[in-house]
Image: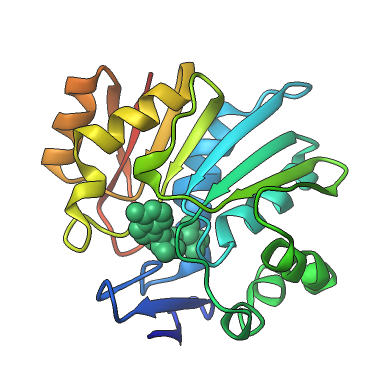
Amino acid sequence: MTRLFETEDGSHSLFSEEFNVSYHSKFGAIQETKHVFIEAGLRYKAVLGKELRILDIGFGTGLNAFMTLLEAEKRGLSVDYTGVEAFPISKELSDKLNYPELTGHPEKEEIFRQLHSDNWGETVQYTETFKATKVKKKFQDLDFKERFDIVYFDAFAPGSQPELWEAPVLQIMHDALVKGGVLVTYCAKGDVKRTLKAIGFEVEKLTGPPGKREMTRATK
Ligand SMILES: C[S@@+](CC[C@H](N)C(=O)[O-])C[C@H]1O[C@@H](n2cnc3c(N)ncnc32)[C@H](O)[C@@H]1O
């Protein structure tokens, strides 16, 4: 069972009974996404006039995808987004998520619903500056080679799914990035940072979102 709850900034998140973990920080789903993925990832790599290719691990509630779409429009950035997910949420849940309203974009409600309802494996141009492809696959089975400028590494926490934070999966992320590409994650665990370094990333420790001291950005 997966149930919906409200985080401290008013935005919704989900709690997975199966993995015994929530999809976002209880201090604020929108706040966390903005800080970790939009500011430390997208804004950091943004270059006007160049298409940014983003790999989201994983698609989940679609919040990273939606906030990336908003940011691309706001800054005139061109984004080619790929969101991977092995366990898509139900329509009943995605219909309830309050992200269009809470981000101040109720006029984008329809686009947010479409992000969820559109077919897996199809590329759709949602706005002038944002196109997206959803890939229904396990992270462990990805084999992208030098395709992306940014990886949003937003897997469930290591306490819940340790195997997703070990060398084999992190190596898949390294392979997927172009040289100079970055992986950003909310996680700042010592073990994870050591593994990222051992794979060949340069690792930076950044200030975390509210409620979390640190986060990590790793550059290939
Ligand atoms: C922290 S949540 C993602 C949050 C998402 N970025 C969002 O904004 O909602 C982690 C996601 O990874 C998915 N997941 C867990 N294990 C997976 C695996 N082995 N392969 C692919 N997806 C997986 C979960 O279903 C969940 O949607």
Residue 11: % across, % down: 54, 76
Residue for point 71% across, 59% down: 119
The answer to which of 20 and 25 lies nearer the viewer is 20
Residue 171: % across, % down: 30, 28
The answer to which of 31 and 146 lies nearer the viewer is 146
Picture quadrant where residue 8 is located: bottom left
Residue for point 65% across, 74% down: 102
Above/below status of 212 relative to 139:
below
Q: Quadrant of the C terminus?
A: top left
Picture quadrant where residue 54 is located: top right
Q: Is residue 80 visible?
A: yes
Picture quadrant where residue 116 is located: bottom right
Q: Is residue 86 left or right of residue 99?
A: left
Q: Is residue 105 left or right of residue 202?
A: right
Q: Is residue 41 left or right of residue 132?
A: left
Residue 127: % across, % down: 85, 49
Q: Is residue 105 visible?
A: no
Ligand 1 occupies quarter: bottom left
